[in-house]
């Protein structure tokens, strides 16, 4: 009999817990006191150099440091994150990115170009993560406080997956329902859910794993982190050169060493000083997702 998504994920979680208990019993018989196993939380920055709209953007400098390093710097301020890694592709063009990441002190995990689910899976298993936080490489204003809230919601709410937006819902231009600014998207996975994602070979779901959970995880506990105020009119993602110039202007005004400015500060800045926004009008977002969704 085939297992449902929830049954599969729960079975994996129970098996992992059982193996831990058996290890603990062996130590107990040997007279060694065993403390509860800590949960390891790893943040994986999903990034590559092959962007079609702004090639090489991960290494473009923001206040003198590559955008990848600025993202890692901010994620490291999250109190619930134990390790930050780069999740990139096996494409030769990303060798440069891996070398740069290693110089920054980031472990690099690599996987297929068109298989996000596999890259996340490898990042989790190579680092022995119990919980994986997915961070987008085009989101240099990612907020460590939001990461902490999302991880807390997953753990304390006993969810299998938590995100700050919902794919395939809402009337936004990119097909996602969100309350946080565009560019603060966060996904948090239990490792058992990443294991479960390997059961699908559908190219669309491999590239957009949240859709698979939403479409086929009826019994999974899926949580959404919402902000009280709708800030989805604010854009701090980097898809185009104008986006990058806007983000640089934000950093020039808000960046302070050893401190991560919050998204509320970004919202207040861009609403009170619209001239900072270097974009002359709306720009197309999530083009690949929208195009592939229409073909289904």
Image (tube, rainbow, N blue to C red):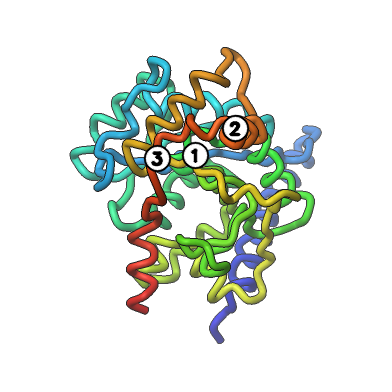
Q: Residue at x 36, y 75 (%)?
A: 294
Mark before the other along the chain sequence, 3 or 2: 2
Residue 94 rendering spot, x and y as whole percentages: 25, 37
Tell me the residue that label 1 is attached to. 236
Q: In what element is the residue under mark 2?
A: helix
SS of the residue at dot 3?
A: loop
Marks 3 and 2, Cα distance to the nearest angstrom?
16 Å
Q: Quadrant of residue 288?
A: bottom left
Question: In this view of the protein, which residue sits in the foreground, 123 or 70?
Answer: 70
Residue 81's x, y, as percent?
Answer: 62, 34
* Image quadrant in which you'd find residue 79: top right
The residue that label 3 is drawn on is 279
* Residue 34 versus residue 210 in the image, above or below: above
Front residue of this view, candidates 12 and 80: 80
- The answer to the question of whether label 2 and label 1 lie on touching residues, with beta carbons closer than 8 A, is yes
Q: Would residue 82 be found to the left or right of residue 284 on screen?
A: right
How far apart in space, not on screen, are marks 2 and 1 (Cα)?
Answer: 9 Å
- Badge 2 or badge 1: first in the primary sequence: 1
Q: Earlier in the sequence, mark 3 or mark 1?
A: 1
In percent of the image, x 18 and y 40: which residue is there? Answer: 92
Residue 51 against residue 80 in the figure, above or below: below
Density class for disc 3 (Cα within 10 Å; few <14, some 14-19, many ≥20) is some
Q: Is residue 263 left or right of residue 27?
A: left
Residue 266 disc label: 2
Q: Is residue 101 above or below residue 151?
A: above
Residue 34: x and y in percent read 78, 36
Question: Residue at image x 56%, y 34%?
Answer: 270
């Amino acid at each position: 009999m085939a297992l449902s998504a929830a049954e599969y994920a729960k079975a994996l979680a129970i098996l992992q817990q059982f193996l831990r208990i058996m290890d603990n019993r062996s130590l107990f018989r040997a007279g060694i006191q065993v403390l509860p196993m800590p949960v390891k939380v790893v943040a994986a920055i999903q990034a590559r150099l092959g962007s079609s709209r702004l090639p090489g953007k991960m290494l473009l400098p923001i206040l003198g440091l590559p955008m990848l390093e600025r993202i890692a710097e901010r994620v490291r301020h999250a109190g619930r994150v134990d390790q930050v890694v780069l999740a990139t592709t096996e494409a030769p063009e990303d060798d440069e990115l891996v070398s740069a990441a290693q110089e920054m002190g980031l472990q690099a995990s690599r996987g297929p170009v068109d298989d996000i689910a596999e890259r996340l899976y490898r990042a989790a298993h190579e680092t022995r993560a119990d919980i994986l936080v997915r961070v987008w490489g085009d989101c240099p204003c990612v907020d460590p406080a939001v990461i902490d809230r999302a991880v807390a919601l997953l753990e304390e709410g006993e969810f299998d997956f938590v995100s700050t937006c919902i794919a395939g819902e809402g009337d936004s231009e990119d097909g996602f329902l969100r309350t946080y600014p565009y560019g603060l998207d966060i996904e948090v996975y239990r490792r058992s859910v990443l294991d479960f994602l390997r059961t699908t070979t559908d190219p669309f779901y491999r590239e957009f794993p949240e859709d698979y959970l939403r479409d086929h995880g009826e019994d999974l506990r899926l949580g959404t982190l919402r902000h009280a105020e709708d800030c989805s009119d604010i854009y701090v993602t980097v898809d185009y050169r104008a986006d990058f110039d806007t983000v640089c202007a934000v950093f020039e005004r808000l960046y302070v060493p050893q401190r991560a400015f919050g998204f509320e500060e970004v919202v207040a800045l861009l609403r009170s000083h619209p001239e900072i926004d270097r974009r002359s009008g709306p720009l197309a977002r999530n083009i690949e997702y929208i195009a592939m969704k229409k073909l289904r």
